[in-house]
Image (cartoon, rainbow, N blue to C red):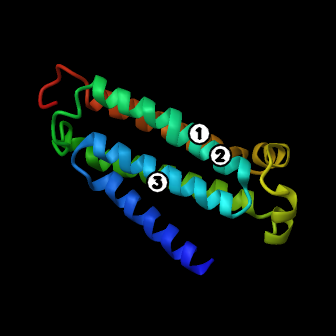
Amino acid sequence: MIVFNLLAGALLLLTGFLSVYLRNAVHAALALAANFVVMGTVYMVLQARFLGWVQIIVYAGAIMVLFVFVIMLLHAAQAEVGFDPLPWMRPAALAVAAVGFLALAWALGAARAPLAAKASAALLKGGTALALGPELWNTWRYPVLLVAALLLVATVAAVALIRPGKEGA
């Protein structure tokens, strides 16, 4: 089990690093898909079968196919990533990211308080949807909504920054 944990951790770090630092957008999306598959495998080893299959089917399957289609539609695969069309926006983006991180950290801290490690393992009963649903929408409601908002803003920003016909894109 220790070997699996080390291997999975190394693969998660490697694919996460590659998804951020690869200059070709399609290669970065494929590295992110590999990250999702490894994460789904980790969930299954932790006996959260439903969460593992959702991670693989929904994220590594459907959402990554959508990302690859959007990348190809926007012609971002032809150009190297790295041009910064709005350099003045970097400090504002860092400030918004810091506020978002603090809000997410607060929500996660507030949600974890009522759960002990032993109680949460007993509540999830092997990661089935019936056990996971009430826990997710009662205890973890605000962190889930904050992550959803973060993903929506990131998608809109990516499409706004890399649209065809724009100078430098």
> Toward which corner of the image does residue 157 lie, by quadrant?
top left
Q: Could you tell me how far apart the alpha carbons at marks 2 and 1 are, in whole angstroms?
A: 6 Å
Horizontal relation, residue 158 to residue 37: left or right = left
Q: Amino acid at mark 3?
A: Asn
Depth check, front residue: 143 or 120: 120
The Cα–Cα distance between marks 3 and 1, rounded to whole angstroms, is 13 Å
Image quarter in which the C terminus is found: top left
- In this rendering, the answer to whether 9 lies above or below 34 is below
Q: Amino acid at mark 1?
A: Ile
- Write down the quadrant of residue 156 in the picture: top left
Relative vertical location of residue 120 with respect to residue 51 in this rendering, above or below: below
Residue identifier under label 3 = 35
Name the residue tied to disc 2. Answer: 53
Residue 95 lies, in percent from the top left, at: 39, 51
Query: From what the image shows, is residue 8 above or below residue 41?
Result: below
Out of 88 and 49, give the one closest to the viewer: 49
Q: Which disc number belongs to residue 57?
A: 1
- Residue 150 position, x and y percent, is 50, 41
Circles 2 and 1, Cβ within 8 Å, touching? The answer is yes
What amino acid type is highlighted by mark number 2?
Trp
**Residue that lies at the very extreme toward the bottom in this rendered image:** 2
Q: Residue at x 67, y 63 (%)?
A: 45
Q: Secondary structure under badge 1?
A: helix
Q: Are marks 3 and 1 in contact (CB under 8 Å)?
A: no
Residue drawn 36% across the image and 43% down it: 29
- Mark 3 element type: helix
Of all residues, the one furthest to the left in this rendering is 168
